[in-house]
Image (spheres, grey):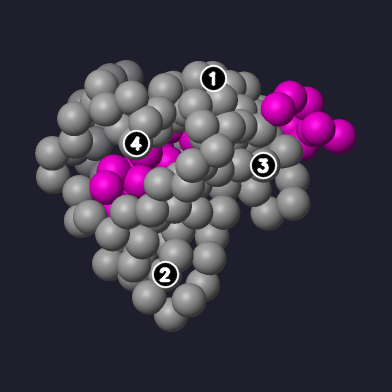
Amino acid sequence: MTFRELTKTYDTAGERIKHMSNMQITICVLGMFLFMVLATCIIYPATKGMPFIWAPREKDIAEVQVTDTRKSDEIIISTDETDIYFAKNVTGYLNYSFKEIEGEPEEMFLTLRYVEKDGTVTEILAGENYIFWDGKYRKLMQPGIFTAYVEGVFFDKTVIVTK
């Protein structure tokens, strides 16, 4: 039976499913799965922002360098395993808006550099509301959280990280 014939013949969804072929059930399940994947890929970035996924892998990071011009001009360099773990995972608070910002919107006071074992350096500049990465300013969806955590771990020592 076709989907149209099933709809005309049986009133309830349960009855229709009982009389579907295995191929029709497979098509329905795959269709629902693909719809959910597509909806998630559209709704999540539109409401929560695009996740920052370009930080290097934790096992590739040799050291982390952090500078905060609001706190001091000192560069904190850490090779500690827990600090590297934190620096990699704190990027989960860098969800950003799709809109690119022209010009410099605010002071970028926090610099987080990942130095990889092969010598590659990845640098993120951050302010309260924006990040600068890959030559573009991006508006943060959760302003202030990233900078507060980084300052709390590396400068104020008010946040304790456990792995």
Q: Which residue is drawn at the image coordinates 19% and 36% (left, top)?
A: 161
Spatial separation of the CA atoms under disc 4 and disc 3: 20 Å
Q: Quadrant of the C terminus?
A: top left
From the image, tell me which residue sits under label 3: 132
- Residue 127: image quadrant is top right
Secondary structure of the residue carrying tag 1 is loop
Q: Which one is nearer the viewer's eye here, 5 or 41? A: 41
From the image, tell me which residue sits under label 4: 154
Q: Amino acid at mark 2?
A: Glu
From the image, tell me which residue sits under label 2: 116
- Among numbered discs 1 and 3, the one appearing first in the sequence: 3
Front tag of 4 and 3: 4
Q: Marks 2 and 4: in contact by CB < 8 Å? A: no
Q: Is residue 96 magenta?
A: yes
From the top left corner, tell me how far across and down residue 144 is, in percent. Answer: 50, 19
Q: Amino acid at mark 4?
A: Phe
Please give the range of residues in magenta.
Answer: 83-107
From the top left corner, tell me how far across and down residue 49 is, in percent. Answer: 55, 31
Secondary structure of the residue carrying tag 2 is strand
The reply to whether residue 83 is in sight is yes
Spatial separation of the CA atoms under disc 4 and disc 2: 19 Å
Spatial separation of the CA atoms under disc 4 and disc 1: 19 Å
- Pointer 4 local density, CA inside 10 Å: few below 14, some 14–19, many at least 20: many
Front tag of 1 and 2: 2
- Kindly identify which numbered label has been placed on residue 70: none
From the image, tell me which residue sits under label 1: 143
Q: Which one is nearer the viewer's eye here, 19 or 73? A: 73
- Among numbered discs 1 and 2, the one appearing first in the sequence: 2
Q: Which residue is drawn at the image coordinates 44% and 52% (left, top)?
A: 65
Q: Marks 2 and 1: in contact by CB < 8 Å? A: no
Spatial separation of the CA atoms under disc 1 and disc 2: 27 Å
Q: Is residue 150 left or right of residue 67?
A: left
